[in-house]
Every structure is written in C-alpha cells, then in structure tokens.
Amino acid sequence: MIPSLPDRIILFDSLCNLCNGWVRYVLRRDADGIFTLCRAQSPAGQKLLESLGLPLDEYESVAYLERGVDGQLCPYLKSEAALRVLGQLPGPSRHFTWLRLVPRALRDAIYDMIARNRYRLFGRRDQCRLPDEAEKHRFLENIDE
C-alpha cells in the first residue's frame, strides 16, 4: 500500500445511487473532514482496488481503509466498513455501532443481498458522480507514486 495516502479512505461505486447517498451522508456529517472519499472508477480507486485484490470492474462492497497504529492502511469491507465509518461520525450515527454485536456473517449476508440488488432498488447513474468544486479537496482522484 502506498504510504503517502490519507489516514481514512472510503472507496465507493460512483455509479450507484445508494453509494452516492452514502457519500452525501458522510460529507454532511463529517464537518472535521476526517474521511477522504475515493470513487472506485477513478485512477486512485482502481489502484487501491488492485492493491486490495478486489475486482476492478464490479463493485459490490464499500471498502474503508484506515491507518492503524503500525502506520499501515487496514482494509475493511461490507458491513464492517460501514459500521466503522458510522462509529466515527458525530451525532446519532454512532448509535448504529451496536450492530457489531450481530455476527458478521449475518450482517454481511444482508449487506450482500442489498449490494446485489442496489441498482434495481435505488437506480444507477449513466455517468460517475464527480465532486463539485466545494468537495474536491475531500476526494482522492489520483495517487502519486
């Protein structure tokens, strides 16, 4: 993993309306800007997915990368990714972390069911969501090596 990356990166499918709703939710609540967002379809997203050994063309999971005490970025996927992000947002979002008490296999089975049907349930964009000028500093688009 490239060491000069931000400490907290959320990788998301920018064609998915549900994923874009998640990004808007995080942007509204993360006033301190602790999270960096990265479109899976961006050059940076493709490099990160490749480094994680994840598919480069099908995105059925949000991925969250968080720098650990050892300085390495630790990847989290599916429900664990979402719950780790929610737990760090201010306000009532933190209360959802109790869902970690539910066995991960069950949480991820529900997550997978929603992920498989997300385009049908929530729709799909024809083009990737791009950050506007006010958001650009919050997005990772390219990785300098």
Image (cartoon, rainbow, N blue to C red):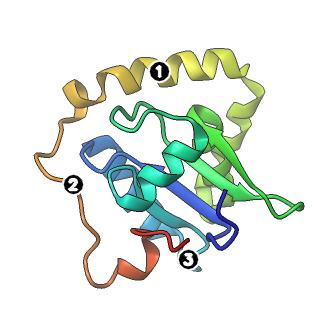
**Residue 25 visible in the current orientation:** no
Q: Nearer the viewer, residue 53 or 19?
A: 53
Q: Amino acid at mark 1?
A: Asp
Q: Which amino acid lies under the numbered mark 2 shown in the image of this protein?
A: Cys
Q: CA distance from mark 1 to mark 3?
A: 28 Å
**Where is residue 70 shown, x and y percent of the image?**
89, 60
Q: Residues within 10 Å of mark 3 (few under 14, many from 20)?
A: few
What residue does disc 3 label?
A: 33
The residue sitting at the left extreme is 126
Label ID, residue 39: none
Can you say whether 137 is above or below 45 in the image? below
Give the residue at x 59% y 53%: 93
Q: Which residue is mark 2?
A: 128
Q: Residues within 10 Å of mark 2 (few under 14, many from 20)?
A: some
Considering the numbered disc 2 on the image, is that residue within a helix, a strand or a loop?
A: loop
Spatial CA span between label 2 and label 3: 22 Å
- Does label 2 or label 1 sit earlier along the sequence? 1
Residue 72 screen position, x and y as percent: 78, 58
Q: Is residue 14 above or below residue 81?
A: below
Residue under label 1, please give it: 112
Q: Residue at x 43, y 54 (%)?
A: 45
Ranked by sequence position, the earlier of labels 1 and 3 is 3
Q: Earlier in the sequence, mark 2 or mark 3?
A: 3
Image position of 112 (left or right of 3): left
Which residue is the extreme one toward the front? 145
| Mark toward the viewer: 2 or 1 | 2
Check disc 3 and give the amino acid type.
Gly
Label 1 CA crowd tier, 10 Å (few <14, some 14–19, many 20+)? some
Q: Position of residue 126 (x, y in %)?
A: 10, 46
* Residue furthest to the right: 70
